[in-house]
């Protein structure tokens, strides 16, 4: 039995550490996924107020959850506070299983983001994984007597503390310097225009339609091939999914740049010849002094490259740029959700060559462009 417990303990501990670290390289990704859940649950009137409050703390929740995953994984491997650790793992797995079951059985969210954007799993895969880990968690809780600490308590406590500190440092660093590993569709070398196109092997959803008519106070559904006579009054048309398609969503499906008049300027901007910059400003942060001078220097030193600004706050950003004498060649509105995916740090700058991403930097690395 001890050997079985040891094997499951190692597997569970390593998986928790791996899961936490994969998300730690992009903590905002998990925060945005949490906000997606909050938005869906907030559609219920009874939960709307609570979800709005939780949405404001999504980043903090993400950092805490990621750190907790790594810490309990390390604690389980070390045998530190084994009873407490086993309980925390069980509670986490109950929570994770609830989330993955919600994704799988409701279809309201496409994926749970269990392993971040680097290792996308289908809802079935994530749910199956969590069921297995939930069984492991119960097993470990019932057999904690077979878990022996690997070192003295103070040594194990030191390791757990160091793991927590390093995980926190990693997360705070990448939120200003961009993820260590870029697994997003806007990564260096990708052609944004090509990735906005439908995949070549896409299979579209198949739908059927039912027409609802009313007569003498009663409503009835009719197929398109058997519509009633003129004595019936048309009420509505229903669309019914007959067969779910596959691979029918472009990797970049929501990136649109709108001009001052609301026109779609995406293709025009991305087909700009030669090298140019895209400056993403989702919203103006409280402290802009850390990067304003760098943007001013970039526009002066790289005068041969155009600078296009992409923002979710057109008026505020335009006023900010004008007030700081930052020249630009175009300012475009963009959906905030799209900017969240394209630019994990606020702001982020891309070096583009036509529609191809040549490089990208968070605000903490803007100085690299002016050296």
Image: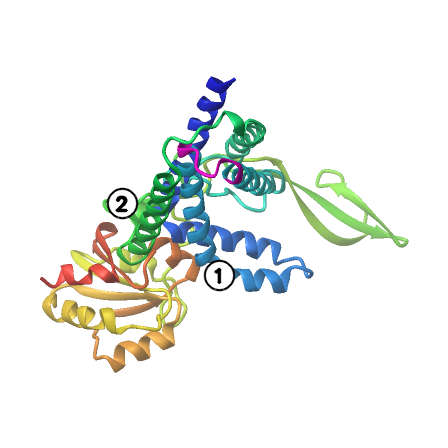
Q: Where in the figure is residue 102, as x and y percent of width and height?
A: 60, 42
Helix, strand or loop status at disc 2: loop
Q: Is residue 329 magenta?
A: no
Q: Is residue 48 left or right of residue 331?
A: right
Q: Can you identify the residue that label 2 sits on?
A: 190
Q: What residue span does the magenta drawing correspond to?
A: 77-84
Task: Name, please, the residue furthest toward the right.
Answer: 216
Which quadrant would residue 227 be assigned to in this image?
top right
Residue that numbered label 1 is attached to: 57
- Indicate whether 297 appears above or below 198: below
Left or right: residue 188 versus residue 230 is left
Q: Position of residue 219 (x, y in %)?
A: 83, 49
User: Does residue 2 appear in the picture of this structure?
Assistant: yes
Q: Is residue 240 left or right of residue 363?
A: right
User: In the rendering, at what x and y percent does residue 114 appear?
Assistant: 46, 40
In front of the other: 83 or 72: 83
Q: Nearer the viewer, residue 5 or 336?
A: 5
């Amino acid at each position: 039995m001890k050997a079985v417990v040891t094997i499951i303990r190692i597997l569970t501990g390593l998986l928790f550490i791996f899961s936490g670290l994969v998300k730690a390289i992009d903590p905002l990704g998990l925060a945005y996924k949490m906000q997606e859940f909050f938005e869906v649950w907030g559609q219920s009137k009874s939960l709307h107020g609570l979800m709005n409050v939780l949405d404001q703390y999504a980043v903090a929740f993400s950092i805490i959850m990621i750190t907790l995953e790594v810490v309990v994984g390390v604690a389980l491997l070390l045998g530190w506070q084994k009873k407490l650790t086993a309980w925390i793992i069980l509670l986490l797995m109950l929570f994770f299983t609830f989330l993955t079951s919600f994704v799988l059985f409701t279809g309201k969210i496409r994926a749970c983001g269990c392993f971040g954007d680097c290792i996308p799993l289908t809802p079935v895969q994530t749910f199956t994984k969590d069921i297995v880990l939930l069984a492991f968690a119960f097993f470990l809780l019932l057999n904690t007597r077979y878990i022996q600490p690997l070192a003295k308590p103070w040594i194990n406590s030191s390791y757990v503390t160091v793991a927590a500190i390093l995980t926190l440092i990693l997360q705070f660093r990448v939120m200003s310097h961009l993820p260590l590993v870029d697994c997003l569709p806007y990564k260096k070398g990708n052609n944004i225009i090509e990735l906005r196109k439908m995949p070549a092997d896409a299979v579209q959803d198949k739908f059927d339609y039912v027409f609802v008519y009313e007569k003498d106070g009663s409503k009835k559904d009719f197929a398109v091939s058997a519509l009633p006579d003129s004595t019936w009054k048309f009420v509505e048309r229903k669309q019914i999914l007959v067969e779910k398609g596959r691979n029918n969503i472009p990797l970049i499906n929501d990136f649109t740049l709108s001009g001052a008049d609301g026109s779609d300027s995406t293709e025009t901007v991305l087909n700009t010849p030669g090298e140019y910059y895209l400056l993403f400003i989702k919203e103006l942060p409280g402290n802009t002094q850390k990067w304003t001078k760098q943007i001013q220097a970039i526009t002066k030193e790289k005068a041969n490259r155009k600078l296009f600004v992409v923002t979710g706050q057109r008026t505020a950003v335009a006023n900010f740029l004008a007030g700081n004498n930052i020249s630009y060649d175009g300012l475009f509105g963009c959906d905030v959700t799209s900017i969240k995916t394209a630019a994990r740090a606020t702001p982020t700058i891309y070096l583009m060559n036509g529609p191809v991403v040549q490089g990208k930097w968070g605000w903490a690395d803007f100085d690299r462009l002016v050296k």
